[in-house]
Image (cartoon, grey):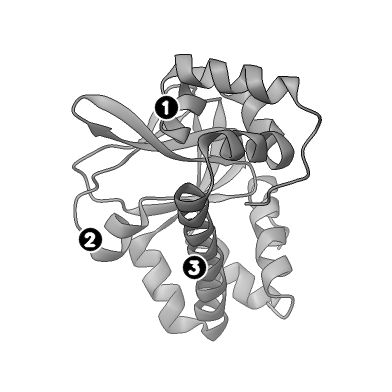
Amino acid sequence: METPLAYRQLKSYYKALMPTLTEAEWQLCEGQLRVRTLKKGTMLQQQGTVCNYVSFVNYGLVRTYYLSDGKEKITEFFKEGEYTCDYRSFLTREPSISLIQVLEDTEVVETPYDGLQMLYREIPAANILGRLIAEKLFIDVCTRSEVQANDSIEQQYQSLINNRSWLIQRVPQYMIASYLGVTPEALSRIKARVNKRPLQSALVY
């Protein structure tokens, strides 16, 4: 059976992580998937509700954030080819404290919690895939925390320019400021200083 177009990028993602994944195993995985097309501004996850899906971004852009004293604090951005989810809520089955919003017209491929647990029980390869995906996400979170703890805001902004230039191009400045934990005015001053310097060597994260 031919894989539907909407699932092909996810299948390639799985095969890159685990080349030994068989077609039969993939077909079982495919049976638990659903595709959603979302307009810019749509909420993918609401605060106070349990997160029931992990979402693979086929195309588009989303942000995760929470509210603190009525102000938004952006924690991360996810683009095509990446997974997004409130993993704490998804794993604990407790209400989410985070929100996930679509920033561009976006298509996601979703796997439900119950379907994922079934795949873990039925397919040994699914457990390996889940572990590999979780390990990557854990490394990303740890790296982000280390950068926040050790690098200045100016260094973090320079790193975005060097390594995630797509983010600078696709996201409004006030969201970049929220992500870095500064005001838009402070970010403008940082940008001015960075733009006056020669190109820095890449600071990877």
- Pointer 2 local density, CA inside 10 Å: few below 14, some 14–19, many at least 20: some
Compared to residue 121, the image places residue 111 above or below, namely above
Query: Which residue bears the numbered disc 2?
Result: 93
Q: Residue at x 30, y 42 (%)?
A: 98
Residue 21 occupies which quadrant of the picture? bottom right
Secondary structure of the residue carrying numbered label 3: helix
Q: CA distance from mark 1 to mark 2?
A: 32 Å
Quadrant containing the N terminus in the rendered view? bottom right
| Residue 82 in view | yes
Q: Is residue 172 visible?
A: no
Mark 1: few, some, or many residues within 10 Å (few <14, many ≥20)? some
Nearer-the-camera pick, 166 or 38: 166
Along the viewing direction, whichever of 67 and 3 lies nearer the viewer: 67
Say left or right for 66 vs 164.
left
Judge whether 92 appears above or below 123 on screen. above
Q: Which residue is mark 1?
A: 182
Nearer the viewer's eye, disc 3 or disc 1? 1
